[in-house]
Each structure stands twice: as C-alpha cells, then as structure tokens.
Image (cartoon, helix red, strand yellow):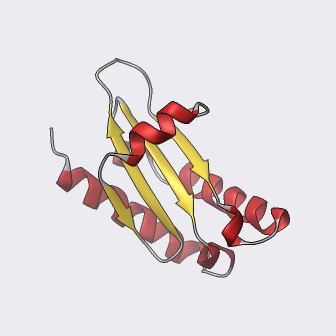
Amino acid sequence: MDRLRQRADFLAAAHGPRVSTPAFVVQNRRRSDDGAIRIGFTVTKKNGTATERNRIRRRLRELVKRVDAVSMRPHSDYVIIGRRAALNRRFAVMLDDLRSALQRLDRRHPG
C-alpha cells in the first residue's frame, strides 16, 4: 500500500462514496490505472492540539496496518479522516469499525 500525498488525490476521493464511524470517516475513489492501493490520512485542527492530532493520525495508521489488505479493493484510493473520538475509543472497536466501513464501501461500489 502506498500513501496519498497530493491534495488533488484527497479532493478526488472526497467526491466518492464515504462511510462515517464515531472515530473516523472513510472516503473511497476507484482509479482506472493499475497502481497499488493508496491511503491518505487527515485530521483537522478542530480535533485538538498538534499533539492530539498526531496521536489520532498514528492510531489510524496502525489500524490500516492491522486490517488485511484483502478487504480493500485494488486500484483504489482511500482517505481516512480522523475525528476526536479516535483519541479515547478502544482500538479493537476501531478496528471492527474500519472493517465494517470497508465492507460497506465495497457494497456501495461493486465491480
């Protein structure tokens, strides 16, 4: 899996389907190229101080490392937007939330 780094990729994913959970929002965009799955993370300033935002981002990155790549569609971009609830939500619950969100995105965008 690669990381999304360019603003245009984040904006493109914002127009695709999305699934909200208490701790984060997952946005998805299908690409027509043969590239790898790409994932981007964002946490806005309204979620707290820089230390808190970095902690949220680290927790989200760890979630993605632990979820199996099979649940993500090839040739897709995913953007995970952290929410303040990610600071205190149990990690196992967040992992289940991410798996569920990916399944829901897959049902919305088959093929």
Please state, as top left, top right, bottom left or bottom right, where the C terminus lies in the image.
top left
Looking at the picture, does residue 26 appear above or below residue 73?
below
- The foreground one among 10 and 96 is 10
Looking at the picture, does residue 48 appear above or below residue 73?
below
For this view, does 27 lie left or right of residue 73? right
Visible residue check, residue 1 = no
Looking at the picture, does residue 98 appear above or below residue 76?
below
Q: Which percent across, then down, holds residue 46? A: 67, 70
Q: Which percent across, then down, holds residue 73? A: 32, 39
For this view, does 32 lie left or right of residue 13? left
- The foreground one among 9 and 39 is 9
Give the total of numbered labels: 0
In percent of the image, x 84 and y 65: which residue is there?
Answer: 51
In percent of the image, x 49 and y 54: which residue is there?
Answer: 67
For this view, does 7 lie left or right of residue 111? right
- Residue projecting furthest to the top: 34
Visible residue check, residue 92 = yes
User: Hey, which quadrant is residue 34 in on the image?
Assistant: top left
User: Hey, which quadrant is residue 97 in on the image?
Assistant: bottom left
Q: Which percent across, then down, holds residue 56? A: 69, 64
In percent of the image, x 51 and y 66: which residue is there?
Answer: 24
Q: Which percent across, then down, holds residue 60? A: 61, 58
For this view, does 108 lie left or right of residue 102? left
